[in-house]
Image (spheres, rainbow, N blue to C red):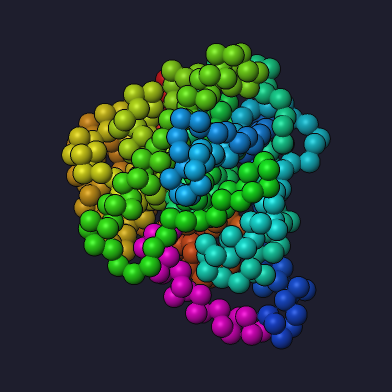
Amino acid sequence: MLNPTVKKISLYSLGFIILLGVTFALGHRSIMPILIPLNDLPAPTGPYAVGTQMFEWRDDCRDEWFTEEQGDKRRIVVQTWYPTQASDVKPLPYLANPDQWLPALSVVLQLPQFLFNHLTDIDTHSVLNAPLHPEVTQTPLVVFSHGIWGMRFQNTAQFEALASRGYIVLAVDHAYDASLTIFNDGTIADFRSGYEGELSEDEFWALRNPQVKTRVADIDFMINTVAQKAAAQDPLWGAADLQHIGMFGHSYGGATSVVAAHQDPRIDATIVLDGWILPVPPQVVEQGVKTPILFIGRETWPDPLNYQKLDVLLSNSPNHKSVLMPGTEHFDFSDAPLFSPFMQTVGLAGTIPAKQLAADLEQRIVGFFDQHLLN
C-alpha cells in the first residue's frame, strides 16, 4: 500500500515514544485494549450473507521474475467474496494466519508488532467455504489489486459490501509485491519490490515497468482462470458474468487497475482509490481509458506530479469522474481506519469519522459498479 507515503508514517511513529514508555511500564498485554480500543468491521448492508474462499493459482506460462530459481513459475494467492445464505457458522477471522501476518503489518506500518496483536480478536462477516447462494446464477465479477506492501484482504469491508449485494469479488496477493504471500505448501513470498535512496528516471522505469507488467498479467491470468473454470461449470465461478467485469485498486493497485483497463477490453468499469499514478506508462496516460473510470482520493499527494499525471490521464478518458475528499489520508481508502481511533491518533487516518467515511466509500463504489455493470 505504500510508496512516498511510507516516509510520512515514520514521522508519525516518533509520536509513540511517550505512549510506548507508558505501555511498557504498565504491562502492554493488559493495557493495549484500553490504549488502543478495537472496532469490528461494519456489517454488510446488502440482502445476502457473505462467503469467502482462498485459492493458490499457478501460471505455467510465466516465469517468476522476482526469483532467480530456474523454472520457477508465477504463483499467486487469491481470495473471493460472494453471496451466500445466512448461517450460524462463525465467520473467518480478519487475520487468518496471525503468526505470519502480524510481523508483516508491523513492517508495513513501521510500528511495533505488539500494537497489533489484538487484531486477532477481529472477525470478518464472511463464512469460509460457504456455498454460493442458490439464487445467484449470473452476476458481475469485480477484481481488486492492492498497493505496494499491501494485502489481498485490506479492503474487506468494501468486498463484503459488494458481495452482500450479489457481486463476486476476487482479490490477489501480488506475490513479492505484497507484504506477505503464504502458499499452500507453507512457503512464503516476502516483499521484494522496494528500493533504497533516490532513483533516476531511467532507474524508476527499469524497476516499475516490469513490475506493472507483472501485476497486470496477474489480473489477466485471474480473469482467464475464472473463464476456464466457468466453462468447466464450476459451481462458484460458473455464476460469474464475464460480460460485466469491474476492476478497482488502492495506491499502486490503482495504477494496476488503470493499465489493466486500458489493455483488457473485458474490463467494463474501473475505480481507482487514492491511486499512485506515477508508474502508469506514458502511452497509457496519453491514450486514456475508454471505459468508465472513477478516481476517489485525498486532496493532495506528497508528490504533486502524481495528480498532474492523473489530470492528463482523466482528460484523455472520455467517461471519467474524480472525487477528492478533504480530511482523508492514504490508508483511509482501506480497512485501516475502521479498526481503531488509534489510526487517527498516529496520522494513518484522516479527520472524517471512520464509519461515516466507510459508508460514503461504500455508496460510491457500489453505486458506480451498479451503474456500469448492472444497468
Of 189 and 99, the residue lying toward us: 189
Q: Classify 140 as above or below 54.
A: above
Q: Position of residue 303 (x, y in %)?
A: 28, 62
Taking the spot 57% from the left edge, 37% from the top edge, the residue there is: 78
**Quadrant in the picture for residue 266:** top left
Taking the spot 62% from the left edge, 35% from the top edge, the residue there is: 55
Q: Classify 239 as above or below 357.
A: above
Main SS, magenta residues: helix
Of 145 and 77, the residue lying toward us: 77
**Quadrant in the picture for residue 105:** bottom right
* In this picture, residue 345 sits left or right of residue 252: right
Q: Is 17 one of the magenta-colored residues?
A: yes
Q: Is 341 one of the magenta-colored residues?
A: no
* In this picture, residue 292 sits left or right of residue 345: left
Q: Classify 318 as above or below 185.
A: above
Taking the spot 67% from the left edge, 70% from the top edge, the residue there is: 114
* In this picture, residue 193 sits left or right of residue 355: left
Where are the magenta residues, as a range? 1-22
Q: Where is residue 339 in the image (x, y as percent from the top left)?
A: 61, 57
How many tags in the picture?
0
**Quadrant in the picture for residue 168:** top right
Of 298 and 66, the residue lying toward us: 66
Q: Where is residue 180 in the image (x, y as percent from the top left)?
A: 57, 53
